[in-house]
Image: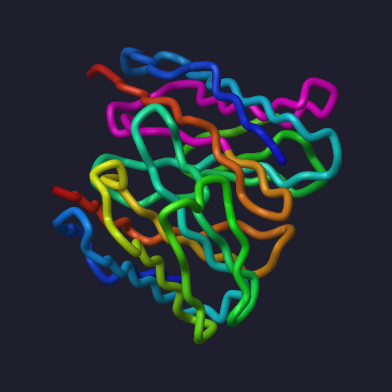
């Protein structure tokens, strides 16, 4: 089985600050990697995904993530956050089934 | 757009009741999943199904069962609801097992009193 670790449980940033959320997974073979976002009162939505190829992937709303195979990591970044980015963020790995991290709650202060 | 629809947004049930949570997807996806989401614990897989009438236990199947009689529908059953099953339940589907994303329903918040 896989395990997914998200290092930051709660993050509070001011608007325009840069964001980086850490994610590590346990399995060293071929995996699919994802970041999902859950805005208050809404369903989980896909931010971005990595299947293969360029390890730097770009998603919606200016988010990007970098896959570093040697570190089993898939960190999420955004250069300048907005108040509307306030949400919960989940890292996930697909290896037969989807494994999710415990989530990071991001609050952006205007 | 893929649509995953859960039959109820909110449910309140009594301890000991049998509870059915229904999920329907409209994109002919092979795989369907049931998760529960609890603060600080993230999403934990209860059961998943990769074909009609097929099911696999996830990480926390105790106290739950599932049914998949048709490809588009995946039901989660709480045989005898207990207060520790109060949670947000999320249904998801995916086209296949690899190189695919999961699509989620809006969730059912179940309260067992």
- In percent of width and height, residue A37 lies at 43, 41
Residue at 59% of width from left, 33% of height from top?
A64
Residue at 55% of width from left, 58% of height from top?
B102
**Of B30 and B18, the residue lying toward us:** B18
- In percent of width and height, residue B72 lies at 48, 81
Is residue A4 positioned above or below A22 on the image? below
Question: What colour scheme governs how the chains and residues are painted in the rendered image of this protein?
Answer: rainbow
Q: How many tags in the picture?
A: 0
- In percent of width and height, residue A76 lies at 57, 28
Residue at 76% of width from left, 26% of height from top?
A72
**Of B89 and A108, the residue lying toward us:** B89
Q: Quadrant of the C terminus of chain A?
A: top left
Q: Quadrant of the N terminus of chain A?
A: top right
- In percent of width and height, residue A100 lies at 55, 39
Query: Hey, which quadrant is residue A73 in on the image?
Result: top right
- Magenta region includes residue A78: yes
For this view, does A48 lie left or right of residue A70? left
Query: Hey, which quadrant is residue A81 in on the image?
Result: top left
Which span of residues is magenta-colored?
Answer: A67-91
Residue at 52% of width from left, 49% of height from top?
B45
């Amino acid at each position: 089985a896989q395990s997914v670790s998200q290092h930051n449980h709660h993050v509070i940033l001011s608007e325009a600050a840069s964001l980086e959320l850490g994610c590590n997974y346990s399995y060293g073979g071929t995996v699919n990697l994802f970041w999902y976002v859950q805005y208050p009162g809404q369903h989980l939505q896909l931010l971005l995904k990595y299947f293969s190829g360029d390890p730097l992937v770009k998603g919606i709303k200016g988010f990007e993530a970098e896959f570093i195979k040697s570190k089993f990591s898939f960190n999420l970044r955004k250069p300048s956050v907005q108040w509307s980015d306030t949400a919960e963020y989940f890292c996930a790995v697909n290896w037969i089934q989807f494994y999710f991290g415990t989530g990071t709650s991001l609050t952006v202060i205007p | 757009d893929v649509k995953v629809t859960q039959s109820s947004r909110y449910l309140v049930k009594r301890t000991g009741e049998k509870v059915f949570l229904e999920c329907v997807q409209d994109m002919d996806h092979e795989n369907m999943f049931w998760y529960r989401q609890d603060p600080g614990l993230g999403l934990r897989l209860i059961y998943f199904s990769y074909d009609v009438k097929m099911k696999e236990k996830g990480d926390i199947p105790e106290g739950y069962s599932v049914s998949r009689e048709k490809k588009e529908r995946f039901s989660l059953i709480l045989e005898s609801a207990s207060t520790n099953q109060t949670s947000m339940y999320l249904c998801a589907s995916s086209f296949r097992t690899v190189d695919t994303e999961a699509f989620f329903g809006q969730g059912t918040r179940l309260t067992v009193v």
